[in-house]
C-alpha cells in the first residue's frame, strides 16, 4: 500500500501490475486532503490507513484504476466503501456528479 500526496507518473502504477487483480489497482481518494491511497487487496484496507492518518470518512471514496487504459476507462467508480446512505450514496458507484468530478481532479493532479 502506498499513499500518494505528490504527483507520480502513470508508469509507476504500471509497475504494480499485475497486482491483486491483474490489470486493476484499487485506490481510495481523499477529496479534501488531495491524497490517494493505492495498491491494497481491499478498498477498506486503504480506507483504514487513511483514517488512521487523519482523513474523515465522508471524504474517502473508493475507485479502481486501470493504468493501461486511457480516458474515462482509466477510472472506475466502484467500491463497497462508497455505500453510504447517510451521504445519499446508496450504491457502490459514486453517484454525486460533484464528488465524481472532485475525484477525477485529485487523480489527474497526482497521477500524470
Image: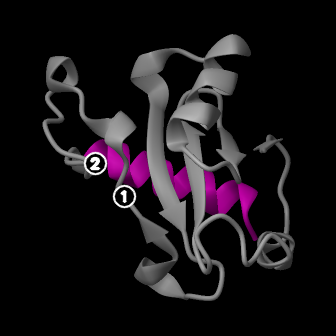
Q: Position of residue 51 (x, y in %)?
A: 61, 16
Residue 77: mark in rendering: 1
Going 60% across and 80% down the picture, which residue do you hit? 23
Is 75 above or below relative to 34?
below
Q: Assign the magenta stretch its main secondary structure.
A: helix
Disc number for residue 94? 2
Residue 54 appears anywhere in the view: no
Residue at position x 58%, y 69% from top? 21
Horizontally, is 98 left or right of 95 in the view? right
Q: Is residue 66 above or below residue 28?
A: below
Q: Quadrant of residue 50?
A: top right
What numbered label is drawn on residue 112? none
How many residues crowd mark 2 within 10 Å: few (<14), some (14–19), many (20+)? many
Q: Which residues are magenta?
A: 98-112
Question: Does the residue at mark 2 contact the one at mark 1 (Cβ under 8 Å)?
Answer: yes
- Percent from the top left, x then y, of residue 112? 76, 71
Amino acid at each position: 500500500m502506498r499513499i500518494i500526496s505528490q504527483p507520480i507518473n502513470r508508469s509507476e502504477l504500471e509497475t504494480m501490475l499485475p497486482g491483486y487483480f491483474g490489470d486493476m489497482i484499487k485506490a481510495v481518494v481523499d477529496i479534501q486532503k488531495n491524497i490517494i491511497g493505492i495498491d491494497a487487496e481491499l478498498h477498506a484496507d486503504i480506507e483504514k490507513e487513511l483514517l488512521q492518518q487523519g482523513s474523515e470518512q465522508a471524504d474517502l471514496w473508493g475507485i479502481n484504476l486501470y493504468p493501461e487504459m486511457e480516458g474515462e476507462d482509466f477510472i472506475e467508480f466502484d467500491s463497497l466503501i462508497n455505500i453510504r446512505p447517510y451521504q445519499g450514496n446508496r450504491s457502490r458507484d459514486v453517484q454525486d456528479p460533484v464528488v465524481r468530478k472532485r475525484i477525477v481532479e485529485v487523480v489527474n493532479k497526482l497521477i500524470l
